[in-house]
Image (cartoon, rainbow, N blue to C red):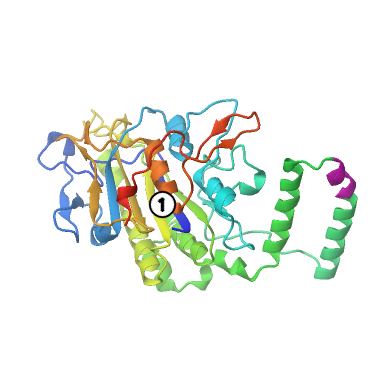
Amino acid sequence: AQRLIFLYMGGGMTHLDTFDTKPGHDNQGPVREIKTNVPGIRVSEYLPGLSNHMDKMCVINSMSSRAGAHEQARYLMHTSYEQRATIKHPGIGAYMLKYLGKLNQDLPGNVFIGGNSRIDGGAGFFESSYEPLAINNPESGLRNIRARFNPTDFRNNLDLAAELDGGFRKKYNLKATRAYTSMYKDAVRLMESEDLKAFDLSIESEATREMYGDNPFGQGCLLAKRLVQHDVRAIEVTYGGWDTHQNNFISVPERTAVLDQALSALLTDLDRTGLLDSTLVVLSTEFGRTPRINQNAGRDHYPKAFSTVLAGGRVNGGQKFGKTDAGGEEVDEGEMSPQDFNATIAWGLGVSTDRVVMSPSLRPFKVAHKGKPNTGLFA
């Protein structure tokens, strides 16, 4: 695949109430399962839209991690490394840009859509040019992107700035200095590009916007679709609120309704426009929720077993990989770590999982640490 859409469910998406149902077991609670368009595969009743797209999806029910706190687990899922105070590791989008380059030279190659104040899996110790462009509100597009004076004056000011900076750049001809120079050039190129319309959701019909859902995540998925249409390499869309320690069976139906509508629309749109085979869609989260329901009708943190999804990008759809036991508490078959999962994503995008990159302190790192890709999930 040439492009990545990474949908991240912040807070820990419950697996029993979404993609790993356990009918008849006390752990399942009141949530029923429903059939999908693939015989023998079932999902939660909360996902009626996605049940019609199972032929495009590979559900991984055997994810397992040792990180049970949000910040550490989120960082691990995005970078494949444990969080350290001395270093920040790059995410898959940054690796894509570094190893594969941009598809569209005018637009940012890496975009983050969501309301989080911090981004895990950004450029890390890579050059700043690989950092994702952050968009808080997908409906606002890119603000303050047009120059406020005429093009001639703008160009004159740029030339003057380049002349004043020339001596400094010559004296300090370092990778970090060149990265900032390149970043400013990219910003100017973006300001003057016709492809800026990729960020304008008002171009879409009202029917299309309604299909994705009138909410930030739904419109974020629509923006992600528009960006891959304009050859942006990597887009992450975040959707929080999955930390259901209390009232799980009130909160989860609300969360899944938004997810089900938006992801169903995204898969439909990418398939209709012929972009699904060349775009890998990933649904991920930091960990699952406890199979056993707590005294507050909630589910707590549970990294031992959870679910993720791959779709598009030549993924063998219509399958579930791995298996948990009867209560969804232990992985019985095909255990997959966050590192293995990220290695599988990287392999599906053509990013080498063996290539070593050196940090500024000359320590060796790989895109998925020691993870091994499961190539059998792809056609």
Q: Read off the magenta span.
A: 165-171
Splitting the image into 4 quarters, where does residue 252 fall? top left
Give coordinates of residue 184: x percent, y percent. Answer: 73, 53
Comparing 148 with 342, the one in front is 342
Whether residue 194 is situated above or below residue 260 in the rendered picture = below
Residue 131 magenta: no
The outermost residue toward the top is 85
Can you give x and y, in whole percent of width and height, for residue 52 in the image?
24, 62
Please identify the quarter of the rendering in which residue 264 is found: bottom left
Identify which amino acid the numbered label 1 is placed on: Gly
Between 326 and 332, which is closer to the camera in this rendering?
332
171 is higher (above) or lower (below) than 86? below
Placement of the C terminus among the 4 image quadrants: bottom left
Can residue 274 be seen here? The reply is: yes
Q: Nearer the viewer, residue 139 or 15?
A: 15
Q: Residues within 10 Å of mark 1 (few under 14, many from 20)?
A: many
- Residue 223, percent from left and from top: 49, 61
Residue 89 lies in quadrant: top right
| Secondary element type, mark 1 | helix
Task: Give me the residue at 24% from left, 56% from top.
Answer: 318
Count up the numbered dots. 1
Pointer 1: what residue? 348
Left or right: where 290 falls relative to 23: right
Looking at the rendered image, the quarter that the N terminus falls into is bottom left
Q: Main secondary structure of the magenta part?
A: helix
Of all residues shown, which one is farthest toward the left?
Answer: 24
